[in-house]
Image (cartoon, rainbow, N blue to C red):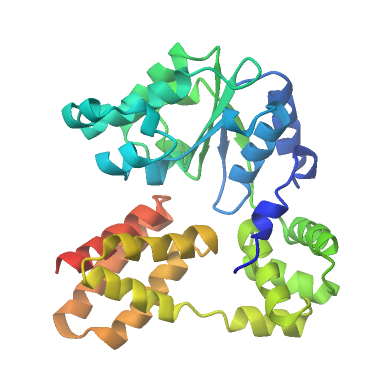
């Protein structure tokens, strides 16, 4: 999509969040900061809810520090040092003389310790926190204890059982369930009316059902349909979403991986998972489809075996990006 993503241009306020309980908890946290742990399935709107909280609580957008844990803990020392969010914390000497684990701990401490741009505190979002190793969770616990007066920590996760007890005890739990079809329809209607897109109820309901409880997927599906067909009817949504294929990009991603161009391969993976909202299982299924036309014999059998392991890991809530990224790295090593 060349136009701005509707997920960004129509980011909700706290009042626009579809679930009563989530609105109530976040409204309280905006008035009186408290550490939170939002947990629920992928696409339920956890990250969007935290961003709504930050916009309500802070005058400056710089007082929200977002760390996607799946991305952050998978970074190399070089990537950490060059990331514009963290580069000012990391001197060349520290990069040379500090282990990756030490560098990550340093970034966590520095992110929490620098003063807010406005107001008395800042909000630190740790997104997809199920990917944090236990030793890093212990480091995070110490950071939360030391900087609790100047930083509000908000953790989002699909797997709350992966968090250690000392962190859970320091956060107020906020369950975020998958939105119902009716709630998704209400969100989509509000967006398409603001966009001036013609629609009918059957078309909106089709998009909501297609998303299957993933609000981000629903909004992007509505945008895809509107841009491709000029409006959202059932026939238009069926044509636009039924024809959305990613095989060509999957093949480009595999070719890049095979050629050792891992940065380009991971960029394509990020576009599919983050920008366009595909589920890790969907991408994995398409990787297998494309693989059947590219490989054979033992090589194809090995890919299928590895895909089975990844599929199991994905059902247990581990990071889509890390698991699929490892598969690409393995293809490049062969």
The answer to whether residue 198 is left or right of residue 208 is right
* Rendered view: 201 above or below 9: below
Quadrant containing the C terminus is bottom left
Quarter of the rendering containing residue 149: top right
Foreground of the two, 75 or 148: 75
- Residue at 32% from the left image edge and 28% from the top image edge: 90
- Residue at 74% from the left image edge and 85% from the top image edge: 235
Quadrant containing the N terminus is bottom right
Viewer can see residue 25: no
Q: How many labels does the image show?
A: 0
Viewer can see residue 226: yes
* Rendered view: 278 above or below 172: below
The answer to whether residue 142 is left or right of residue 331 is right
The answer to whether residue 159 is left or right of residue 47 is left
Foreground of the two, 16 or 92: 92
| Image spot of residue 287 (x, y percent) | 36, 74
Quarter of the rendering containing residue 208: bottom right
The answer to whether residue 277 is left or right of residue 67 is right
Quarter of the rendering containing residue 214: bottom right
| Image spot of residue 94 (x, y percent) | 23, 26
| Image spot of residue 331 (x, y percent) | 22, 68
- Residue at 62% from the left image edge and 58% from the top image edge: 216
């Amino acid at each position: 999509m060349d136009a701005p993503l509707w997920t960004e241009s129509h980011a909700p306020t706290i009042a626009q969040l579809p679930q009563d309980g989530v609105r109530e908890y976040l409204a309280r946290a905006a008035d009186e900061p408290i550490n939170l742990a939002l947990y629920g399935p992928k696409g339920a709107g956890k990250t969007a809810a935290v961003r709504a909280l930050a916009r309500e609580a802070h005058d400056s957008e710089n007082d929200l520090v977002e760390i996607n844990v799946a991305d952050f803990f998978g970074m190399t020392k070089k990537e950490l040092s060059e990331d514009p969010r963290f580069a000012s914390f990391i001197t060349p000497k520290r990069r040379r003389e500090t282990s990756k684990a030490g560098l990550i701990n340093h970034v966590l401490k520095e992110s929490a310790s620098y003063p807010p741009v406005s107001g008395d505190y800042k909000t630190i979002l740790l997104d997809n926190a199920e990917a944090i190793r236990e030793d890093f969770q212990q480091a995070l616990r110490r950071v939360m204890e030391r900087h609790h007066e100047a930083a509000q920590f908000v953790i989002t996760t699909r797997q709350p059982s992966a968090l250690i007890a000392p962190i859970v005890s320091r956060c107020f739990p906020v369950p975020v369930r998958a939105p119902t079809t009716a709630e998704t329809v209400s969100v989509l209607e509000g967006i398409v009316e603001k966009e001036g897109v013609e629609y009918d109820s059957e078309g909106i309901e089709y998009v909501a059902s297609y998303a299957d409880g993933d609000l981000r997927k629903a909004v992007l599906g509505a945008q895809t349909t509107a841009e491709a067909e000029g409006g959202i009817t059932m026939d238009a949504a069926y044509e636009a979403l039924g024809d959305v294929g990613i095989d060509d990009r999957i093949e480009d991603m595999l070719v890049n991986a095979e050629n050792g161009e891992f940065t380009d391969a991971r960029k394509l993976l990020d576009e599919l998972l983050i920008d366009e909202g595909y589920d890790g299982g969907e991408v994995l299924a398409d990787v297998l489809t494309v693989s059947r036309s590219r490989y054979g014999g033992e090589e194809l059998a090995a890919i299928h075996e590895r895909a089975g392991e990844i599929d199991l890991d994905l059902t247990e809530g581990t990071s889509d990006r890390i698991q699929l990224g490892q598969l690409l790295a393995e293809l490049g090593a062969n």
